[in-house]
Amino acid sequence: MIRLGCHCGAEISFDDRQCPRCQKRLGFDPTDFCFYPIDQDGFVEGGGSSMDGRALCSNGQDYDACNWIRPAASQTSLCYGCEFNRYIPNLSRGHNLSLWRTLENNKKRLLFSLMGLGLPLSTRWECPDSGLFFDFLEDLHEEGNNEGSPITTGYLDGVITINVLEAEPISRIRQQQAAREVYRTVLGHMRHESGHYFYQHLTQDQGFQGQYEPIFGIASADYSEALNRYYRDGAAENWSESFISPYASAHPLEDWAETWGHYLHMYDTLETASNFFEHCTNPDRLSFDDKICAWGDLSTALNEMNRSLGMSDPYPFAINERVKDKLRFVNDSILALKTRKKSWAVDPPPS
């Protein structure tokens, strides 16, 4: 995450809706990675002719579920980030509005990272064959209701489906325990699922599979059987010798998605550190080996800081040589994806 500020000079957070100093309502513009003051009608204040017609996304204006600005030429009332939604939960039910707000905040962080990395990114409305959708769905079975089908968080054919209960801490911990995971966050889950999406893009490249399989394994291995075996028997005792997490050992496709998600953890946290601490270097200026070295130092410091506060480790993982090779492959794959034409007219944020 880059450092952000209000026009009054106050420092603000990516998730902020209001400036703590001048009390102006704020909106984030993904075309230039800046915040702008928003008037009482939801329009950008004092931006001049180039900003005429730009307004807060209707999901922000109507539900306080978004703080992004929609373009003046938009054919909908939604911002770029909210255009990725295909379904949102029924907002008249229970705590769905609060849960959706949490999901939107985390989805925006994911999109910001993907944009910053320069990855090809488009909605499925724009590109029906290769774009991305998010479905935020309520699992009524959790309440003992037989209506509809159980909702499983996952990815299929360009659609990332998130059970809205991922945004509810107690339910998420219960799912973490059931899946035998050492770590589960909303943002982490979205990063993982985005790995499945970009894997589909990469398989279109000639030679990708031949480079992928010696590192991760045979992607065509029976997926259902592998997952059933994992949930029945758990990970192998020696999983830590070859995988970043127990779940990564379930199947080569999950190994890829877990590794991709961890790469995004590493990149985003290193970028944040470089924006807040002078001695930290932006990851875009580092070689892969230097990124790994910097991440080792930073993640160790983060864990020790949390322990000093009596809290659990934010990064309870170890990167050995096998995992490092996998992360290197993800790093190289991202560089390959960056060469593709982007459908969004946004340059990465300044480093």
Image (tube, rainbow, N blue to C red):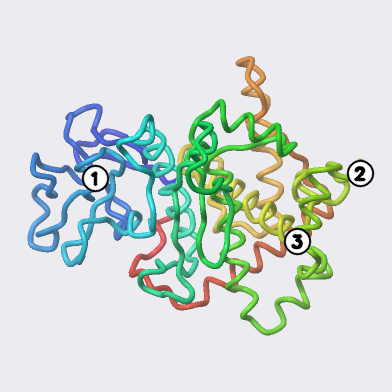
Amino acid at the residue labelled 1: Gly
Task: Where is residue 154? Give x, y as percent.
Answer: 59, 53
In the foreground, 79 or 147: 147
Residue density around tag 2, few if under 14, some if 14–19, many if 20 or more, within 10 Å? few
Amino acid at the residue labelled 3: Tyr
Q: Quadrant of residue 257?
A: bottom right
Q: Mark 3 highlights which residue? A: 223
Amino acid at the residue labelled 2: Asn
Residue 214 circle label: none
The numbered mark, 1 or 3, whose residue comes first in the sequence reads 1
In this rendering, would 131 be left or right of 31? right
| Spatial separation of the CA atoms under disc 2 and disc 1 | 48 Å
Task: Where is residue 310? Give x, y as percent.
Answer: 64, 15
Which residue is rendered at x = 36% and y = 73% of the image?
126
In this rendering, would 304 be left or right of 214? left
Q: Quadrant of residue 7?
A: top left
In the foreground, 16 or 284: 16
The numbered mark, 2 or 1, whose residue comes first in the sequence reads 1
Q: Mark 1 highlights which residue? A: 27
In the rendered picture of this protein, how many numbered marks are placed on residues? 3
| Spatial separation of the CA atoms under disc 1 and disc 3 | 43 Å
The C terminus appears in which quarter of the rendering? bottom left
In this rendering, would 200 be left or right of 207? left
Determine contact: label 2, label 3, CB under 8 Å.
no
Q: In terms of secondary structure, where does tag 3 sit?
A: helix
